[in-house]
Amino acid sequence: MAQIHTEQRFEDAIEAHLLANGYVKGEKRHYDRATALDTHQLLTFINESQSKRWAKLASQYGTQVEARFIARVVKELEARGTLSVLRHGITDLGVHFDLAYQRPAHELAPEVLGDYKKNRLSVTRQVAYSLTNSNEIDLVLFVNGTPVASAELKNPLSGQTVQHAIRQYQKDRDPRELLLGFKKRCLVHFAVDPDLVSMTTRLAGDQTEFLPFNRGEGDGAHRSAGNPVNPNGYKTAYLWEQVWQKDAWMDILGRFIHLQKADPEKPSSPELVIFPRYHQLECVLKVEAAARATGSGDRYLIQHSAGSGKSNTIAWLSHGLFRLHDATNNLLFDSVIVITDRRVLDRQLQNTIYQFEHKQGVVERIDKHSAQLAAALKAGRRIIITTLQKFPLVIDKVADLADRSFCVIVDEAHSSQTGEAARKLREVLSGGEAAEDATEEPEGDFEDELADAILAPRKNLTFVALTATPKAKTIEIFGTKDAEGKPRAFHLYSMRQAIEEGFILDVLQNYTTYKRSGAWSRSRSVRTPRSNPTEPTSPSPDS
């Protein structure tokens, strides 16, 4: 690829790739500043995908149908926000309209897949968005005429970097503008240069904080912030080639972005639009692709540092795996079981899944007794949240389940639990057959015992273990062998990268020793880590 020397050439390259891969070119003249919609794309999508419904609405509104319909869309966007409108549509005079179609989890319903292909994703350059000034945003991405993302582009070769784009959002982009208002139109804003990407979901003037949205550079514990050299183009090409790719982008809008309500018990907690950080998105998609390709029975070790946002990663994994189908369109797992002691995850997971599926009862929290868990397993509840301590008594209550397939997601695999419970977990889910050498359980923490409990692989049982600091034994049991035959984490977000990106503290920074009363003591200065507008700001197990 020829070297890009100007911001305009950078825009050209991104737009050209998107247009060559299914996007439609948006025209500036079709953008309506008063409604912050591309009305041409919106009406074209409605007429092409729902012509009979449109004819019914037109019979009631007559020549005013376009103006009245757009007014209804604007009213719903103001009341419910972009996510809800795109996922659940609107109703006008008793006629329901879908504002976007999500890709089906399988190919058993060709008409649903046909609807999905009618989506019109468009990219518009230099969008003049304000009614009071002539400011323009470099790129805006639309889905069927509704704006979902903005991007400011900079080029170091012309003297500006991603930091200049961030300051432009902070200083020159008024969050009171309709296009930029929180959750009502654009859901995420990207600052981009050829080397780095940052993003935010809430503009707040000088208080706007962007988060790194980069792949990380290097391997293992030495993996650092930033992006690796791309032999085929620019370091940040993954943004428009992978993240903004049509199917991937619709997937993110459909089941990754979610609205986290303010905590009623904490009046100061803000409402948040959660957009996945790059390592979260990559991890979930990688696990799903592997499970789809190889089926049930594998083990995946997710080594994500503190500060990685594991609660959200688990929520996305749970949702993705419970609806995952194999190449023959068969559901891969009967139930996804999340083992955790995090109370915050119970509520968060249920609320998140409800936004995606809009169904109550998908997630069941086991908070009473083993009979409750047994009933949930027998009933085939899709996602079950429980603690390991509840498993030992379940074997007496559950019938043979060997003909069913389970995915077990273990949160923080080093938490202290008993080996008997871990052995019973495998015994219950594999149909009552315990390990031959498990008659006596040695003392040890849960990470040791869980590894012992799954030494014998079970085709109907898939394990996904998340931990920040896995032991050598855990890596050996859960790890994926590399080209040299050495076990490695299936996916890694290193402590070094988390420190460099500002999500956790470097405990060795300003670390000093001093002698007091004949004994050596140690101390360190403390600095404040990055606050995160797309994660809970109150203390949590992820902090």
Image: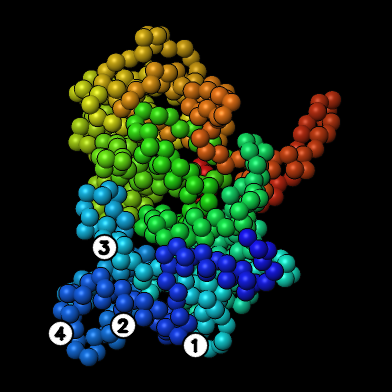
Q: Which residue shows up at 50% across the image and 18% down it?
A: 444
Residue under label 2? 71
Give the mark nearest the N terminus, 4 or 2: 4
Q: CA distance from mark 4 to mark 2?
A: 17 Å
Query: x and y percent of residue 497 in the render?
Result: 63, 45
Type of amino acid at the residue the image marks with label 1: Leu
The part of the image, by quadrant, that contains residue 196 is bottom right
Query: Could one spot residue 369 in this view of the protein?
Result: no
Disc nearest the viewer among 1 and 4? 4
Q: Is residue 42 left or right of residue 206?
A: left
Q: CA distance from mark 1 to mark 3?
A: 35 Å
How packed mark 2 is, by other alpha carbons closer than 10 Å (few <14, some 14-19, many 20 or more), is: few
Type of amino acid at the residue the image marks with label 2: Ala
Query: Could one spot residue 59 in this view of the protein?
Result: yes
Give the mark nearest the N terminus, 1 or 3: 3
Answer yes or no: do the residues labelled 3 and 2 have beta carbons within 8 Å? no
Give the mark nearest the N terminus, 1 or 4: 4
Give the mark nearest the N terminus, 4 or 3: 4
Residue under label 1? 131
- Spot the residue most to the front: 2
Query: x and y percent of residue 307 in the render?
Result: 56, 45
Label 1 residue SS: loop
**Relative to 462, is 58 above or below?**
below
Q: CA distance from mark 1 to mark 4?
A: 33 Å
**Relative to 46, is 348 above or below?**
above
Q: Which residue shows up at 66% across the image and 66% down it?
A: 4
Nearer-the-camera pick, 319 or 205: 319
Residue under label 4? 59
Query: x and y percent of residue 282 in the render?
Result: 49, 47
Type of amino acid at the residue the image marks with label 4: Ser
Q: Which residue shows up at 83% across the image and 28% down it?
A: 517
